[in-house]
């Protein structure tokens, strides 16, 4: 799967994790461009991250240029929700690991919001993770 990814677009909370050794994306296997959606670029920004702000569509477009003909993967529930609301999220890939987290933002928490129709396009499993791929249906 990593060979199909050209860039990551992540939110601030994911950036805080990803800049640490134990929080690196894909267990440290990812080495490509990472774009952080933010309103304020930190003074002490970690190396290897590019900060983008403003309109989410422009942030996605910037990541797409870096990704070339590969996927842009969005990390972070809030960032993914912004992409979904802007209509720039085509697929949802959910990694289900063998641990339940007790903190963070709920995946696609939309109180009073509209339903989002999804179509399953892939399902893969290993001993460590189940990957569920879903296409956003217009």
Image (cartoon, grey):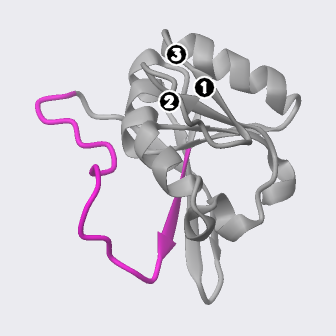
**In the figure, 98 relative to 79: above or below?**
below
Please say whether residue 37 is one of the residues in the magenta stretch: no
Residue wearing tag 1: 51
Mark 2 nearby-residue class (10 Å; few <14, some 14–19, many ≥20): few
Mark 2 or 1, nearer chain start? 2
Q: Secondary structure at mark 3?
A: loop
Camera-nearest residue between 12 and 122: 12
Mark 3 or 2, nearer chain start? 2
> Disc 2 versus disc 1: distance between alpha carbons?
9 Å
Q: Magenta segment, which residues?
A: 92-113
Q: Residue at x 77, y 65 (%)?
A: 29
Residues at circles 2 and 1 in contact by the CB criterion of under 8 Å: yes
Residue wearing tag 2: 42
Q: Secondary structure at mark 2?
A: loop
Which percent across, then down, holds residue 11? Answer: 47, 37
Residue 53's disc is 3
Q: Nearer the viewer, mark 2 or mark 1?
A: 2
């Amino acid at each position: 799967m990593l060979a199909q990814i050209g860039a990551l677009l992540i939110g601030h909370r994911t950036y805080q994790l990803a800049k640490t050794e134990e929080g690196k994306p894909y267990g440290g296997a990812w080495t490509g461009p990472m774009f952080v959606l933010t309103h304020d670029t930190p003074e002490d920004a970690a190396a290897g991250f590019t900060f983008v702000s403003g309109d989410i569509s422009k942030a996605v477009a910037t990541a797409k240029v870096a990704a070339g003909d590969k996927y842009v993967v969005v990390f972070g529930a809030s960032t993914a929700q912004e992409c979904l609301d802007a209509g720039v999220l085509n697929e949802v890939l959910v990694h289900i690991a063998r641990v339940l987290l007790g903190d963070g933002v709920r995946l696609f928490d939309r109180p009073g919001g509209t339903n989002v129709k999804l179509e399953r396009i892939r399902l893969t499993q290993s001993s460590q993770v189940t990957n569920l791929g879903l296409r956003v249906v217009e």
